[in-house]
Image (tube, grey):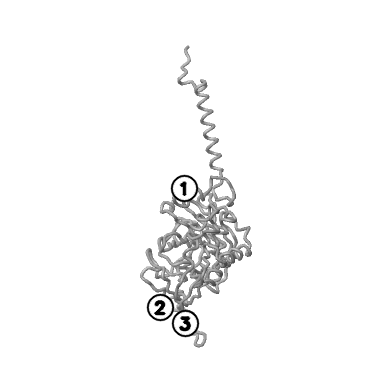
Amino acid sequence: MKLNHSRCPHTPKAVSLLVLAEILILFALIFRLLPSSPPIEEASSSVTTASDSIRKGFIKWVDFNVTADAMRQALRLDVDSYNQTPHLNWLELLAYLGARYGGDFSHYQASDMEHLAQQLKEGASMEELTKDMKYYSYYLEAYSAVLGGMTGTYEIQIPDESTGEPKWVTKYGLKSFSPIAKNYPYNDFDDFGVSRSYGFKRQHLGHDLMGQVGTPVIAVESGYVEAIGWNQYGGWRLGIRSFDKKRYYYYAHLRKNYPYHKSLQEGSYVQAGDVIGYLGRTGYSSKENTNNIDQPHLHFGMQLIFDESQKDGNHEIWINCYEITKFLTMNRSETIKNQKTKEYYRVYQMKDPAVPGGAKSQMIDN
């Protein structure tokens, strides 16, 4: 009997093909294990998020671990130097340290930022100080995407010292708010990336703030309602997109029966500080309006979008919001309840120039 070498799996040619296939599989596995986040400024590895983003035109991933202390210090330097020369831009300060630390703010020291600020005050330019920092532009774009909508000039009501009645003032500084209303208790810890198993095994891509059912949930930034309704994982949830389209805020597990502020529908404009819904424990069910979450909490998530291809699917960029929520505790929106309708409203109104058409924030109905 003649052996048909063209079909036999053990011929030298077939063995060579098998070896080649195994080598290709091995290289594919090694490639998947290569790091994807930017190295420290002095590192020589070319396989980085920063270099990949620069080469392909938009950022593919952001590991945001800037501490609340660093954000507070940078913001204070920015606000204190407003209308002065030089005006210290808090995003540039943070990006400089991000490039210096390789994005790892566990190395953060307040003295590093003070030294940077002093150099700028003495006449050095940021361009001069960062000319040898290969990834400074990456961190500036990344941190601007995360924090860029949180500061600026705006008008807001504050109580008059003599009468106690609200009066309008113009301010520059932080115009974003904590997602939990003022005077409502909550507790949290850094839970980004921990395991979740409902539906399928996955990572927790948000930050949980444990509180009481019915606690008013606040719009962190001005934007428009892009998603509203039921999701089997998030329960009653809201998705609010910033007006510059770079941030998508996700508020989930809202209250059963009455999850949202009655003024909201898809496409509605909201201003930072508005009441948008109420904390609950809905979700983990394909059946609408089901409480399957054991502990009441708000799941708060922030997605970055540098290109619309990243909005849905395998290329989504969700960042750790733990330090951001700590930072935003310095600005919590005070609310009041309408006893007739049982709806909550913000006490002090705001005029945010980021809102198209100059729309006003929500007013309490009588």
Mark 3, Cα crowd under 10 Å, few <14 / some 14-19 / many 20+, is some
Residue 245 horizontal side relative to residue 327, left or right? left
Q: Is residue 36 above or below residue 142?
A: above
Task: Name the residue beneath numbered marker 1.
Answer: 55
Task: Name the residue beneath numbered marker 2.
Answer: 365
The picture places residue 344, in percent across and down from the top left corner, at: 46, 74
What is the spatial separation of the Cα atoms under label 2 and label 1, in whole angstroms? 53 Å
Q: Nearer the viewer, residue 3 or 145?
A: 145
Residue extending farthest bottom: 162
Q: Which mark is residue 133?
A: none
SS for callout 2: loop
| Mark 2 vs mark 3: in front | 3
Residue at the image position 55 percent from the left and 61 percent from the top: 94
SS for callout 1: helix
SS for callout 3: strand
The picture places residue 329, in percent across and down from the top left corner, at: 55, 69
Task: Name the residue beneath numbered marker 3.
Answer: 166
Q: What residue type is labelled 3?
A: Pro
The picture places residue 65, in percent across and down from the top left corner, at: 57, 58
